Image (cartoon, grey):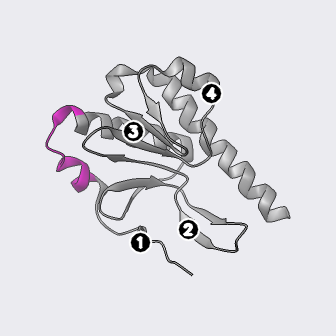
Amino acid sequence: MVELKTKATNASVSEFIDAIPDADRRKDCKALVSMMSKATGSKARMWGPAIVGFGDYHYKYDTGREADWFETGFSPRKQALTLYLMGGKSKELLNKLGAHSSGVGCLYLKSLDDIHKPTLQKLIADSVKRLRKIAKEKARA
């Protein structure tokens, strides 16, 4: 069975964010730490060298593969802020968000100045709520 390369580390989230060269990107990352901490009730942790994750989620695929991951997180990639919304994304909220693009489990933002921040907070909280509901249902099964 293939093991995930990205795992939680003991690296400092503050040091990681403070090392971001662009002041606006640093500010956005600090805002995301606040938003995601609020949504999960969890402290930020580094996952690998460049992902900040919040909460814990153990998942199991239909194939039997299992892994530990975070409930939500982000990475300040060069092209955009990449948000990992493991519980999915509400289309209704995405329509109200502002300038963004998205993939299956990711949301890409150039800057938090380009989006409606209260909608982003709701989007993150909604994703975490859905993921926790899925986890409860699987635990009962």
Q: Which residues are magenta?
A: 14-24
Up-down relation of residue 16 to residue 87 (above or below): below
Q: Is residue 73 magenta?
A: no
Q: Which residue is mark 4?
A: 91
Up-down relation of residue 140 to residue 128 (above or below): below
- Quadrant in the picture for residue 16: bottom left
- Does 41 sit left or right of 34 as displayed? right
Residue found 51% across the figure and 52% down from its top: 42
Give the structural element (helix, strand or loop) at label 4. helix
Q: Which residue is mark 2?
A: 68
* Image x and y of residue 139, in percent: 78, 64
Foreground mark, 2 or 3, reads 2
Give the structural element (helix, strand or loop) at label 2. strand
- Does 1 sit left or right of 64 as displayed? left
Q: Which mark is residue 32?
A: 3
Q: Are marks 1 and 2 in contact (CB under 8 Å)?
A: no
The amino acid type of the residue labelled 2 equals Asp
Marked residue nearer the N-terminal end (3 or 1): 1
Give the structural element (helix, strand or loop) at label 1. loop
Cα separation between marks 2 and 4: 27 Å
Q: Which residue is mark 1?
A: 5
Cα separation between marks 3 and 1: 24 Å
